Every structure is written in C-alpha cells, then in structure tokens.
Image (tube, grey):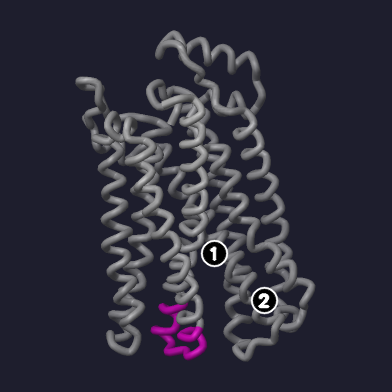
Amino acid sequence: MTGETLEFARLQFALTAGAHFLFVALTVGLATIVACMQTRATLTESAVHERMTRFWGQLYVINYAMGILTGLVMEFQFGLNWSGLTHFAGNVFGASLAMETLVAFFVESTFLGLWIFGWGRLNRWAHLGVIWVVTITAYLSAYWILVSNGFLQNPRGYHVVDGVLRLTDAAAVLTNPNSIVAFFHIIGGSLVTAGFFVAGVSAYQLMRRAVEEELFRRSLRIGVFLTVPALVSTVIAGGIQFAVVGGEQPMKLAVFGDVADEVAHLQAAMMAQFGPGDYVPDAGWVRTGGVLMLVFFALMFLFSCMNFLLALATPVVRRCWPWHLLLIAAIPVPFLTMLAAAGFSGKPGGNLGWCTGC
C-alpha cells in the first residue's frame, strides 16, 4: 500500500465512520427517551404519552435503519481496506466486533421488529418489555464496539505469536479503562444529542402550529430538561477520559498542549522501543478537534441552562418563536461536537507501537 492509498483509505473510513456515528449518537439516546415515554404511557395509560411514543418511535426507527446501512459499509471496509490489521489483530479485537454484530444486527433488530409490528398485538406489558430490550441492547452494542476501539487505543491482554496477536487475558480487554470511560462519555453525549433533537423538532412543530400542541409541548420540555444533566455527566466522563488518555497516550496530550519538548522526548522514546517511525499524531486534527469540542460544549451548556429556565413558563413554550428558532438551529451542534471529539481522539498516539498507523 502506497502512502497516497493509505491516506485515501483513512479518509474513506473516517467519512463512513463519521456518518455512521451520527446516527448511532442519536438513536442510542432516542431509544432511551422512547422507552421512558412508553413506560409512562403504560403505567398511567396516558393517551398523549402513547402518541408521543409512536411519533418519536417512528423517527427512531428511520435513523436506526440509516445506522444499520452505514454500519454495513464500515464492515466491508474493515475487510477490504484494512485486511492486514484484521489478519494481525483480529484474534483479539475481532471477537468484540462479532459480539457487536450479534447484539445490534440480530438481537436489537429482532426485538425492534417485534416492537414495530407489536402495536395492538402484544400485551402492553410485553410490548413495553420489548422496547426496553431494544434500549439495553443498544447500550450493549455501544459497549462492544468501544471494546474494539479501546483495544486499538490501548492494546492489552495479548501476546504476539507467529506474527499475529493471540488473546491471553479476556478480562483485561473487556475492562480496558479506555473502553469503560469512553462508554459513559458516549452515552452522555448520546442523551445530549437526543435531547437537542427532541427539543428542536418539537419547537419546529410548535412554530407551525401543529394540531398536537400538547404532545410537542411536553416533548420540548423533555428534551430541554434532559440536556442539562446529560451535559454534566458527559463532561465528568470526559474529564476522567482526559486523565486516562494522559496515562495511556501521553503523546496525544503533548501534541494537544503544543509541548514541543515533550513531543520530541516521547518520539525518541518510542523509536527506541518500537523502531523507526512517526509516532506523532496529526497536530491539526488533534488541536482543532479538541478546541472545537470544548467550545461547543461551553455553548451547549450555557444554551441549555437558558432553555431550562424558559421551559418552566408554559406561554413561552407554546408561542415564543424566536426561542423556537434557536432550538431548531441548535440541533446540529451536538453532532458537530461528536465529530470534533472524534477528530481529537480518532488516531491513536502514545504507547501503541504496532497500531500507531491505524
């Protein structure tokens, strides 16, 4: 593989992964919201909450289908563009990829089908149980894919035998700090994304004076009230993740902080340990992604605090169209934040040796 081919392969996978992750970030959080709405509808037999469940459930299904399609393209790219990686490391991180496929493509999709076609056919408690299975498997799917990503970021629990990796400690792979902390960070970010999405779509419906005013008024408040605690949990997990990255991949934080002496020292140490090579991640991606991620978070937090106060007043929720416009305009911000975070953390940098070029 030439250098030009390698860069094109990286660009192609980055575009596919970025597109796929946008749908994942939304659907994981949206599934949680839909499950909570249906729980309220089942416990109280509330007609408006049942209609809310159906409306947001339809949007969830559409985005879930798009996530499946983009995910399939990623699977093909693993085999076509990165066959060398899969031959070398597939014995370790391939198992978690397979588990993610089994959980997402089979268990989650099967129960989602039962939920879609089970309206009026399944017992209401059984139907509620089905959507919670869908939600739990969505979380499990996120965990398994982060196990694979965590291994590439911080490989552990393996030995090199006959030129390929062999699993020696499954518990070390499954409890990789990089994977565990990233899981909570991603879940928090997914809830933020879903909250902004629900609030923005509800604001659009209220602006156009939709017939279901109560449905969208309640939905807007759900989205707004969700985002503040979700943002707090996300930044806490992100702070912990910064510490984990600093211990496992000091090169990345040195590049982000523009500490030239530290970068040179780490580059020399890694060349001595792993042999000649460039172990410095792209400074432009790391710094730009990290700065944008922090700026977008600050904007979202300030905006969400304002939204929280405005949502307490029913007349404002119903008729304040300038605020509705801001809520609609804010829908893309969590998605942009997710992509910026991916730019910051995407390429490993640090103690990886054999997979610094992944």
Compute the Cα span from label 2 to label 1: 15 Å
Residue at the disc numbered 2: 204
Residue 194 marker: 1
> What residue is at 51 percent from the left and 61 percent from the top?
26
Residue 309, horizontal then vertical, whole percent = 72, 69
Q: In the image, 243: left or right of 207? A: left
Residue 290 position (above or below residue 325): above
For the residue labelled by badge 2, is the local secondary structure a helix, a strand or a loop?
Answer: helix
The three-letter amino acid code for the residue at tag 1 is Ala
The three-letter amino acid code for the residue at tag 2 is Tyr
Residue 312, horizontal then vertical, whole percent = 69, 75
Question: Which region shows up in magenta?
Answer: 37-51
Q: Nearer the viewer, residue 218 or 346?
A: 346
> What residue is at 36 percent from the left and 30 percent from the top?
155
Earlier-in-chain disc, 2 versus 1: 1
Q: Is residue 48 magenta?
A: yes
